[in-house]
Image: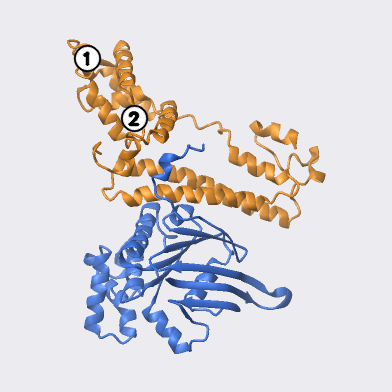
Amino acid sequence: MSASGGSVVSSIATEDNTQYANQHAIEYDQVMSVPHAMLALLSEGPKYGLRLREEFEARTGEVWPLNVGQVYTTLQRLERDGLVESDGAAEDGPQKRFRITAEGEQELARWLRTPPDLSSPPRDELVMKVLVALRVPGADVHEVIQAHRRYLVELMQQWTRIKEDDARGDLSMLLAVDAELFRLDSVARWLDAAEARVKRAAAEGMMPGLDQAGPGNQARWPLPRHRREVRTRG
Amino acid sequence: MSMLELVRVSKSYGQGSAGVHALREVSLTADEGAMVAVMGPSGSGKSTLLTIAGTLEEPTSGEVLIAGQPVGKASRNAKARLRRRVIGYVFQDFNLLPGLTAAENVSLPLELDGVPGRKARTAALRALDGLGLSDRASHYPDQISGGERQRVAIARAMVGDRRLLLADEPSGALDSVNAEAVMRLVHSACKNAGMTAVVVTHDAQLASWADRVVFLRDGRVTDQTGPAPGPESLLTQEPTR
């Protein structure tokens, strides 16, 4: 996608609309390895620093811009570690050309095939709210669930509008938007499942109430390990 | 202008303790060119709502208006004419006739309505062409993919001058890419051809193609989304993770 493409996503990363993009840039740095993205770009052939930055932004749907300093610092580290090499003639900057080394290619292949750590569940505010709603006297858990479901669907409508508006079908952007939609969809489906379970539990007289909140009920309504503090307060 | 309006529609089956209230005082409006999704779990009344909106069933109480006209007091023939000329139906299992080609399936409702065969076929081919199915016109349903079958079903629902598309889990039998293609077609029919669509689904991702999502639970409308904001709204708000 060209920077002047005029698409919704390209406008995200430019000028005044940087708040959202910058927020995600921070998150993205935590999950997306900039060094490995640089290695991936260099695996196509030698490139100058400036071009690497431009291509990085284009490949990530321009949602996660990098600053110039970040690019050159990353390249210096990769060179120090023997994963890339430069022509060495020019000073560090946009005119310096880099190429990937054999060690860099091995590292890139290793990284691509290493699954991210999905083993420990993240702290999930939404799960906590639904669990707490079950135990708060007078709280309608269905209303709580519906409020979150409506929010999720409204958010999904906004992401879908991006797909709808992108007549060119930019693949990187479609994949990035799909990822966000599937993530939100999984939360919506959890809400559906939670609502069905609550309904069934209510029909079977198994809803937890204040009078049932004793230790005897803990096996029936276990909370995730990282939520224990919620139960002790309840 | 409202293309479809349900006013305090209720539907019950059976009586007394054995009675089932499928819909309870449901009110719903779909304006011309709008795409409305109805979401809810199994048994929430989604399909009943659609059959009543499509005049295939009568409500126990309440009123249905199509293009501003109440259909409750219309004669059986008038309702049948409405179904042939104004309303198009799309079902999860496509409901194509296996012994007819794609073009014949699409032209059939026109021919049943008295349109001459050649004219009906021309309209059918135009509808298929509009959905990118020109090269499938002479194929039988078992010779095309599931996604193509549903696109033929959509062409059948839109052929002629139909203005109201009622779809019951139209992409339920499809993989996610084909399901999205179906929703894109319905969305495009609303935005570009002025159709009004009411799509029943339990899938949030597919419902998100609609301008408005109505939530149904235990036969009642419990909630609905606000006016769909544009994608630019994603740029101005704090991420909420």
From what the image shows, is residue A179 above or below residue B189?
Answer: above
Type of amino acid under label 2 = Pro
Q: At numbered mark 2, what does the secondary structure look like: helix, strand or loop?
A: loop
Type of amino acid under label 1 = Ser
* Chain letter for the orange colouring in the rendering: A
Residue drawn at x 25%, y 25% is: A52
Judging by the rendered image, the residue that carries numbered circle 2 is A65
Residue drawn at x 23%, y 71% is: B126
Colour assignment, chain B: blue
Horizontal and vertical percent position of residue B50:
50, 71
User: On the image, which quarter does residue A200 sit in?
Assistant: bottom right
From what the image shows, is residue A117 above or below residue B89?
Answer: above
Question: Is any part of residue A85 visible from this angle?
Answer: yes
| CB atoms of marks 1 and 2 within 8 Å | no
Which chain letter goes with mark 1? A
Horizontal and vertical percent position of residue A80:
31, 10
Question: Is any part of residue B138 visible from this angle?
Answer: no
Judging by the rendered image, the residue that carries numbered circle 1 is A86
Residue drawn at x 24%, y 14% is: A85
State left or right for residue A88 relative to residue B188.
left
The numbered disc on residue A127 is: none
Horizontal and vertical percent position of residue A25:
40, 29
